[in-house]
Amino acid sequence: MIPRAPSLFHIEDGVAAAKPMPDGVSGELVGLRLIIQPSTPRQRPPMAVLRRSAVRPSPSPAMTSASGCLQLRDEGFMGLGFLKCCYCCHKKLDADMDVFVYKGEQAFCSAECRSQEMAREERREIEMLVRRRREAFHSRRAAPPPKIGGGSTDRQARLQIAAW
């Protein structure tokens, strides 16, 4: 039989008796156990929620638009500027609000705004795919048919096809 290496998450029985415990603390030691639970197929991944209180605002120059949302003057610098207002409804995001983030640089005030943007993006992708397929179909139909037998006329091509 192959000897097993001691587990990091298992506490030996003799360790608890060797150390004296302060008053009010039981002598029973509790170790860590790994609990593995398979996720169900219906279970959705957790939404990305960013707590604004943990983020310091950047000291870059800003200007206020008509919606009350702060916008950065320097377009090249993204920084934390996307956390100023909701990407969907342009509502100003306060420091005490939960911010829902999608694709890393799109902040939303609620899960509803986030799901609306996701649905909008999905519709755009489907429309783009349909447009590409239509263009490919029309370009194939608009192209002249390939000539049979080099530079022959249509009558000669029909005769060649009929002879087969």
Image (cartoon, rainbow, N blue to C red):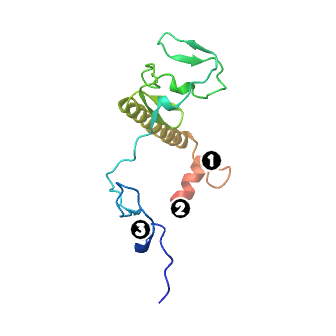
Question: Which of the pair 155/86 is nearer the observer?
Answer: 86
Assign a secondary structure to mark 3. Answer: helix
Q: Compared with residue 123, is residue 92 higher up or lower down, i.e. above or below?
A: above
Q: Nearer the viewer, mark 1 or mark 3?
A: 3
Residue 59: x percent and y percent? 63, 21
Q: CA distance from mark 1 to mark 3?
A: 100 Å
Q: Quadrant of residue 143?
A: top right
Residue under the image location 46 percent in, 33 percent down: 51
Q: Position of residue 95 (x, y in %)?
A: 46, 24
Q: Marks 1 and 3: CB-CB under 8 Å?
A: no
Q: Secondary structure at mark 2?
A: helix
Percent position (x, y) of residue 10?
Answer: 43, 69
Q: Point out the tag, 3 or 2, that comes first from the N-terminus.
A: 3
Q: Residues within 10 Å of mark 3 (few under 14, many from 20)?
A: some
Residue that label 1 marks: 153
The residue located at (56%, 18%) in the rendering is 71
Q: CA distance from mark 3 to mark 2?
A: 98 Å
Tell me: 76 left or right of 113.
Answer: right
Give the numbered dot on residue 16: 3
Q: Which residue is mark 2?
A: 163
* Residue appearing at x 42%, y 74% in the figure: 14
Q: Quadrant of residue 60?
A: top right
Quadrant position of residue 28: bottom left
Question: Would residue 104 appear left or right of 109 to someone viewing this image?
Answer: right
Q: Is residue 110 left or right of residue 140?
A: left
